[in-house]
Amino acid sequence: MRYFLLSFFLGVFTLPTPLAAETGDDAWLRYAPVDVAMRGRYDRLPAYVAALGDSVVIKSAQAELIRGVRGMLGRTLRAERDLPRGSAIVLGTFAGVQAARLAIRLPTGLREDGYWLKTITLNGFPCLLITAPNDRGVLYGVFALSRRIGLGEAVSQLDEQQAPYAPIRWVNEWNNLDGTIERGYAGPSLFFEKDDVVEDLSRARDYARLLASVGINGCVVNNVNANPRVIRAEFLPQLARLAAAFRPWGVRLGVSIDLGSPKIIGGLDTFDPLDPRVANWWKEKFDEIYRVIPDLGGVVVKADSEGRLGPSTYGRTHADAANVLARALRPHGGLIFYRAFVYDHHLDWRNLKNDRARAAYDNFHSLDGQFDDNAVVQIKNGPIDFQVREPASPLFGGLEKTNQAIELQITQEYTGQQRHLCFLVPMWKAVLDIDMHAQGAGTPVKALVAGKTFRRPVGGFVAVSNVGRDPTWLGHHLAMANLYGFGGLAWNPDLSARRIGEEWTRLTFGHDLRVVETIANILLQSWPTYEKYTGPLGAGTLTDILGSHYGPGIESSEENGWGQWHRADHDGIGMDRTVATGTGYIGQYRPPVAGLYESRANCPDELLLFMHHVLYTYVLHSGKTVIQHIYDSHYEGAEQAERFVGQWRSLRGRIDEPRYRQVLARLEYQAGHAQVWRDAVCNWFLRKSGIHDAKGRVGHFPNRLEAESAELEGYQIEEVKPWEAASGGKAVECLSSAPPCVASFRYEGKPGWRDVSVQYFDQNNGASRFKLFVAGQLVDEWVADDALPSRRMGADSSTRRKTKGLALRPGDEIRIEGFPDAGESAPIDYLEIRPTARGVPGVSLGERIPRQ
Ligand code: GCV
C-alpha cells in the first residue's frame, strides 16, 4: 500500500512538465528557471545591480547578471550606475571600488582575471560585492555567481576568491577566410565567408560570451595554415570588427600569420628573420595593426611544418623567427605563440631510427633560453598529433627558460569528429598531471605550462576549438562538454573530470538526478570506449591518416613519410623508441620518466606500443597477450558504445525532445560505426598475425548475410579498398541504368522477433534511397543523406540502418531495393539479423510468430 501511495504521489505530483524544445544554441548558458523548491534560497538576493565604472566589459557584466537572474529566478534586477539606497549587487574593479570610497579592505595578491565575491554591508544594507583587479575579473565573478544559482548553490554568505591557474587561456579556430574550417565538424565559420569577415557578427559575439563564461580570454580566429592576406592593410578594418565583437566579453583577438608575409605581401625579396629590412617590416606592420586594433592579444605562427614557410629557408632558428615578431609586438603588449608542431613529413619510413615523435624536442630543446619574454612555445599535448592516446610531449619537461603553453584539441579530429562521443577532459587531465620531473619530483605538465615551475612570466592553455554555425556549436550536443571542460581546466586543472562533467550536465540539461548521473557516466566512459574500439595500447588511432582522419585505415600510417607509424607486421607491433635499441625518443624525458618508459616491464600497458615493438604474443600487465587485448578491447568498446544508446534511451521524457532525439541519433550511429572499427581492426590483425581470437569471435559473423552472396538484380559486386573496410572485403553497387537494383536474401533462422540492420555506404556525393521488404511487405525506407566524410565506399562512409521488431519466419525473403543518386550508387555491405531485445514496445522476445 505504501508503495502504491508513493508511486501515486510520484506519478501525479512529480510528473515532469513538458520540456520546452531547445536547439543547443545557449549551450550551458541557458539560465533555465530554478526549480520552485530551490528558488527560496535566492529570496534575499538584492533587487539592484550597481556597476561602478562604465567599461564595455563592466557593462556586459551588469547586463549578463540581469539576463541570468531574469532567466533563472524570473526577476528583473534594476540596473544602477551608482550605489542605490538599498540592498544591491555591486560590480566594480578594485579601482572602481576605491573611487567609490567603499569602506572595504580589498584582497591583496589576487591575480589578474581573478575575482572576489563578498557579502558586505553598505550604508546599512546587505550587499553582494563582485570585485576584481581588472574588469574581466568582474565579468568572471558575475558568471561565477550565475553559475552558483544555476547549480542551486547558496549565495547568501559569500566570501569566495578565485584566480585562474594560468594567464593564457586561449582558443584557436582553424578558420579559413573563405569560410571553411580545417578539421571543423560543425558547419562553416562564424567569422569569415567568401574571403571577408561576415556581415552579421551576432554569433561571433555569442561565442565570445560563451568563452568568457568559462574564463577563456583569447581567440585566434584564423587557421594556423594562415592566409597572408589576413594582415594586409585593407583587411585590418575587418579584423577590427571581430575584435570589437569580442571586446565586451574580455576576449582578446589573435591572428595566425604567415612567416613569409614580408615577401608574400610586403614586397621584400626576403623574409629572413635576421634581415633588418624584415625586422623593420614587422615593426611597421604591427604598429599599423595596433593602430586599428589596440588590444590585439597576439599572433600564432606555424613554421617549417607541413609545407609552411619557416626560418630554415635561411638557415635561421625558430628562436630567430619568434623573436623578430616578439620585438615588433612587445611595445604593444602582444604575445607571439610559436608552435612546436614542427616536423619533417618526408621521413624515410625504411629507417627504423627515424621518429617523428622526436621532432618537437629536437627542434626546440637546444633553443631554450633564446626566446624573448613575450614569446610562448605552443606545444601539442603529445609528440605526434592529437591521437587517442599519447604520452605527454617530452618538450614540456625540456624547457626551463622559455615560456610554454599546451595545445589541446577540442575539435575531435582523431577522436570521432563529433559523430562519436569522446569526452576529452580525462585524457587532458591524464597529460596535465604527469610528473615530468623537470626539477625533481612534483613538476606536472600543468605547472610547467602555467610557468609555475620555472617562474616564467606567461604560459598556459590553448585549445583548437573549431566551432561552426551548427546550432550546437560543435555538431554534437554532448561535445560541448569538451569546450566547457577546457575552460574549467584552464582555470583550475585540479578539478576532477566527474565534477566538470556533472556541472556541465546540470547547466545544460537540468538537475534531474537520473539525467545528471547517466550523462556524466556516459561522458566519463566515452574516451576509454573510443580508445578501445580504435587504437590500442598507444599504437595511435589507427585511422586513415592520409585523408579524413576518421574511420579505420590501419595501413595508411605505414610506408609513407608522415611518421605516424605503428610498425605492425606479421610478428608484432609498436615503435621501438627506446634508447637501447630504438629511436632514442625515450631519452628526451628526464631520467625518472625515461626509466619508466624504457623498460618494457615498467611501461604502462596503455603506452606499450608507443614505446616498444613487441610480439603479438607478448604478455601485458593485464595478463593478456597483445593480440588478445586488441581483439577483446575492440569487442568491449563496441559493446560499450551500444550500451550508451540504451542508457541514453532511459532519459526519454527527461530531456527536451529535439536534443534527446539528436543525441540519440548520434549515439546510434556511433554504435554502428564502432562495429565498423571493431571489424576492420580485428580482421586486419587476424590476417596479419595469423593468430586466432581465443574467444572465436573475430572473422565469424553468424548473424550476417553478405550482400555479395545475395541474389542480385542490377547490383554488381565490387571490391572495397582497403579490404578491411567492408565485411568480406566486398560490397554491391547499383550501377544499372534501370534502377532500382535489388538484393534479395533468404532468412533461414528460427521464427521470432528480429532486428534487421542493413550495413550500407552513405557517401557525401549523393543521397541514395533504400527500401526494405520482408516477404513482399515494405517495412522500412530511408535516404542515405548523412554528411559522412567520404565520396567513396569505405570505412568512413560505412553506416547502418537498424529496423527493429520485425517478425521473421524461416524462408522469408528480405529484399532491399536501392535507388542511386548522383555519384552514390546505393551500395550495400551486408545484413545482420539479431533477436529483438526485450523492452521494445509491443514486442516480447521469443513470442511466437503465428503461422498464416
Ligand atoms: C592546421 C594536423 C592536422 C592539420 C593541422 C595540423 C596542425 O596535421 O591534420 O589539419 O593543420 O595538424 O596542427 O598544424
Image (tube, rainbow, N blue to C red):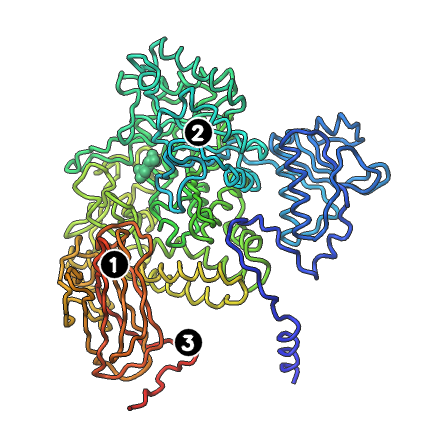
Query: Which secondary structure lies at badge 2?
Result: strand
- Give the mark nearest the N terminus, 1 or 3: 1
Image coords of residue 116 (percent x, y):
68, 37
User: Counting other residues with Cα less than 10 Å from the Cα at mark 3, is it few (<14), some (14-19), or many (20 or more)?
Assistant: few
In the displayed structure, would residue 581 be above or below residue 654? above
Front of the two marks 1 and 3: 1
Q: Which amino acid type corresponds to the residue marked 3 in the rendered image?
A: Val
Spatial separation of the CA atoms under disc 1 and disc 2: 44 Å
Mark 3 sits on what residue? Answer: 840
In the displayed structure, would residue 525 be above or below residue 262? below
The answer to whether the residues at label 1 and label 3 have Cβ atoms under 8 Å apart is no
The answer to whether the residues at label 1 and label 2 have Cβ atoms under 8 Å apart is no
User: Counting other residues with Cα less than 10 Å from the Cα at mark 1, is it few (<14), some (14-19), or many (20 or more)?
Assistant: many
The numbered dot on residue 761 is 1
Front of the two marks 2 and 3: 3
The numbered dot on residue 404 is 2
Spatial separation of the CA atoms under disc 2 and disc 3: 54 Å
Image coords of residue 840 (percent x, y):
41, 76
For image coordinates 40% across by 65% down, the residue present is: 643
Image coords of residue 771 (percent x, y):
27, 69
Q: Which amino acid type corresponds to the residue marked 1 in the rendered image?
A: Phe
In the displayed structure, would residue 3 be above or below residue 42? below
Query: Which secondary structure lies at badge 1?
Result: strand
